[in-house]
Every structure is written in structure tokens, then in C-alpha cells.
Amino acid sequence: MNRRPDDKMEGAPDKGLPLQSGQTETSGHTEFKPAGGGGDDPITRNLKRVYEDIAAEPLPENLLKLLERLDKVDNKNG
């Protein structure tokens, strides 16, 4: 496909395309703003809940042993 210098790329954000829901035009760049006012939508709430559940779990024993070994090596070199 041959393009002339004045051809515009299809889908480029600065070519006057309509903004998506929750987006605003800021200094030539399209900025995404999440819906729900500060993470109060069901998807965000569920993601936070799952993350908090996983973050509260204890580290696996093999990972703790690896960290101990790395600390020992670091102390020897350090």
C-alpha cells in the first residue's frame, strides 16, 4: 500500500477520533480515567479483595529457604 506524506494513520489518537468513555484530552495526549470514582466499581473491589487475600498468605517454605541462602551469600560478600 502506497502512502502519500499527507495520509493520516488510521486510529491515531491525535487525529480527531472520539474519546473512549472515561478518557479526557490533555495536552495532546489521551489520558485514561477509570470509571467508578476512585475504584468503587465491582471489578476494582474484587481485584483488591483477591490481592489482599493473596498478600496475606504466608510465603512458601522453599522461598523462605532461598531468601535465607541469598542473605548468607550477601553477608559473605558484603
Image (cartoon, rainbow, N blue to C red):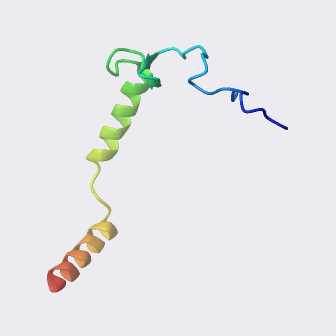
* Left or right for 63, reference 3: left
**Location of residue 19 with respect to 66 vertically, above or below:** above
**Location of residue 35 with respect to 43 vertically, above or below:** above
Front-lying residue, 12 or 67: 12
**Number of labelled discs?**
0
**Location of residue 74 with respect to 54 vertically, above or below:** below
Q: Which residue is drawn at 34% across and 22% down?
A: 39
Image x and y of residue 11, in percent = 66, 26
Report the residue that reaches farthest toward the front.
Answer: 5
* Left or right for 1, reference 46: right
**Location of residue 12 with respect to 71 vertically, above or below:** above
Front-lying residue, 43 or 57: 43
Front-lying residue, 74 or 12: 12
Question: In the picture, which quadrant includes the N terminus?
Answer: top right
Q: Which residue is drawn at 18% across and 84% down?
A: 77
Report the residue that reaches farthest toward the right.
Answer: 1
Question: In the picture, which quadrant includes the C terminus?
Answer: bottom left
Image x and y of residue 15, in percent = 61, 21
Image x and y of residue 14, in percent = 56, 23
Image quadrant of residue 52?
top left
Image x and y of residue 4, in percent = 78, 32
Image quadrant of residue 8?
top right
* Left or right for 20, reference 35: right
Front-lying residue, 62 or 43: 43
